[in-house]
Amino acid sequence: MFLAKWDVICLGVRGSVANVVETIQREDEIMRPYPFSTLAISAATLFATTAMAGGLPKEGTFSVAGHEDGSYQDLPPSGEPSTVGAWDQAGKVNGEGLLKDTEWRCFGAGETTVSTFKTPNGYCVATDHDGDRIVFRIMMESPLPVHDFQWSGVSITSTGKFAGIVASYKSSCVMGGMPSKYSMECDGEGTYKLP
């Protein structure tokens, strides 16, 4: 705006002073609405930035549909009436929302009794394309043989755009190929809230 007025003044020196003053007054009248519009745009931008973190809404729902391949190994001592084993798996979630297209790495220990397999505390690390992560503590229990089961997770720590997130999900899974090598398909939903 300053350069526009200066250019008008310089050009107006050749004309009358009254023409220059009149031109500046018209320009000021034309420009008056812009400060309000700029303020409104700035406020809307600030609100949108505050309401979203890293392009994510502050809270919402997401789906976790994906495939993982893994392995399981009994840990000594192995035998009746119960055993403990370590499991490790990796895959990709193709659901919608917060965790869409994230890579997952899950691991934990499983307890096998005569009739059930359970993981009281396992962990899944979801990593997005920016390298930001959410770590979930997961729990599951299933009658033997393990085939269909429920799997749930609660966020315990996070990085990047997910920092400070509170999230949880529940999935229904179908497993095949146990005991040493397996694959599983899971489908579920969750909720989250960012600080």
Image (cartoon, rainbow, N blue to C red):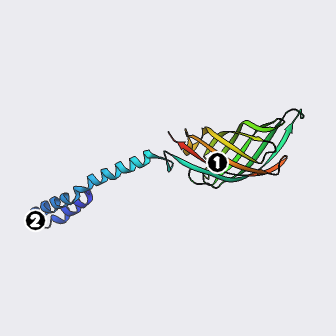
Specify the label residue 127 is tagged with. Answer: 1
User: What type is the residue that disc 2 sits on?
Assistant: Ser
Q: Is residue 25 above or below residue 136?
A: below
Between marks 1 and 2 in the image, the one whose residue lies nearer the viewer:
1
Image coordinates for residue 89, horizontal then vertical, percent: 75, 47
Q: Is residue 142 above or below residue 4?
A: above
Specify the label residue 16 is tagged with. Answer: 2
Q: Is residue 138 above or below residue 178?
A: above
Question: Reading the chain from its start, which is encountered first: label 1 or label 2?
Answer: 2
Q: Is residue 36 left or right of residue 155?
A: left
For the residues labelled 1 and 2, the Cα–Cα distance comes to 69 Å
Image coordinates for residue 160, horizontal then vertical, percent: 57, 44
**Disc 1 secondary structure class:** strand
Image coordinates for residue 163, horizontal then vertical, percent: 56, 40
Residue at 26% over, 59% down: 3
Q: Badge 2: few (under 14), some or many (20 or more) residues near its Cα, within 10 Å?
A: few
> Quadrant of the rendered structure where residue 28 is?
bottom left
User: What type is the residue that disc 1 sits on?
Assistant: Thr
In terms of depth relative to the viewer, which is nearer, 96 or 178? 178
